[in-house]
Image (cartoon, rainbow, N blue to C red):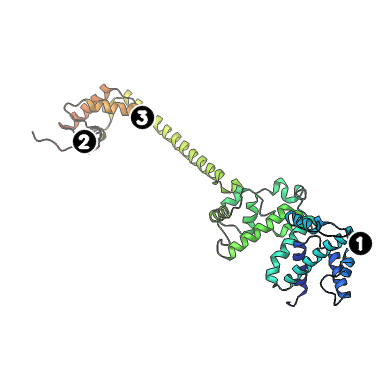
Amino acid sequence: MLPLTGRSKEMVRLALRAEYPAFKPAFEEKLDAAIKANVGASDISDVIVDAVRDGSRFSIKAMWPDEAERSHVEAWAATIQGTEDEREREIWRKFLDEVQEYRGRLLDMHEDEIGPLAEKAFLAEQEKTNPLRPEYDIWAFYSKPDAKADFQRWSRLPTWSVDEAVALSFGKDPEKVSLDKLKSPFATRSPFIMGYRARHDHISRAVRVGDLSEPMRKEPFIEWADSNGLELPPELDLPNVVSDARMWERRYQEVVEERDKLLVDLRTAQAELAGWRGEDFSKIAPKARKSLFRIVLGMAIARYGHATVGRPGARERIEADLNALGLGLGDDAIGGWLKEAASELEYAQTFQYRNYASNRPIAPKDD
């Protein structure tokens, strides 16, 4: 038998009660006192059995809560000869024999082996004596509307701490809900606090082994949480919708402003063109007039495939583009200006300089 510390003795008691819930501390005290008073008695004598059963409620169901095992005991008990009292004494003896045999095995175990068995008993007792109570969360500060996380704000931050990631994973504002702020005498009865503690421990362990870093970025944390089956608020995984909307709104305003500016320029140009139409073009200085003709004729030839001799199709294409731009000018006017420009510049172009469809130059054909 291994030497026991105070901690390991308690672990043995808990593990023993996990296997035999009816073996309460009062039973244990009675049994130990009876054994001590009857040193030399073989196994569990009648004196020891009677000492334990005295004042104790007899219940096969409490002694063997497992239904299959209880059925086996009841079948065995039915074969016992004698009075009801003698039959009850034998059932008590069987129960105490099993308890003593199991306790002996526990006493020979190392603490690492007893630990899981003791934990099972401890959690079972906690569930009975200190169960989780959802009503404790209803009126708590972390259940109030102002404790809800501003996901847009926190999503814009480059990194989070462990405590911030835990709070956000529950949909809570990290500045109002944290491990330190969840200290409460009723913590073990709060499903939220116990869940928060468990998740904080889980994420902290992930950081220690390198599965996560601290500070951590949003995307790796969400990926890790998904792979570990952690349920997260859907808002935590959404793109920054508000930020994106504001960006597109700014860009839209910029486009609108640019459009308005171009419309002003267009109306100014249209007014100037209308003014030119009503004036004597000959009043323009000869040098400026020739420069303007060079620009007009050069663009017509280079862009629209115009030829000073023949090929009237260029005028139609020019007219179509001007109309599309809101700078309407008739075919005759276009033809007249092009003819006047070629005449004044004494310029002749008999071949199509450029394929207006592909915008590639066309080499002139030899006559």
The residue singled out by tag 1 in the image is: 55
Question: Quarter of the image holding residue 113?
Answer: bottom right
- Judged from the image, the secondary structure of the residue bearing numbered disc 2 is strand
Q: Earlier in the sequence, mark 1 or mark 2?
A: 1
Which of these two is toward me, 276 or 143? 143
Q: Earlier in the sequence, mark 2 or mark 3?
A: 3
Q: Residue at horizontal 72%, vertical 57%? A: 181
Q: Residue at horizontal 89%, vertical 75%? A: 37
- Judged from the image, the secondary structure of the residue bearing numbered disc 1 is loop
Q: Residue 256, percent across and down?
A: 47, 36
Cα distance, mark 1 to mark 2?
117 Å
Count of marks overlaid on the render = 3
Q: Are marks 2 and 3 in contact (CB under 8 Å)?
A: no
What's under tag 1, amino acid-wise?
Gly
Which of these two is toward me, 81 or 231? 81
Residue 275 drawn above or below residue 246? above
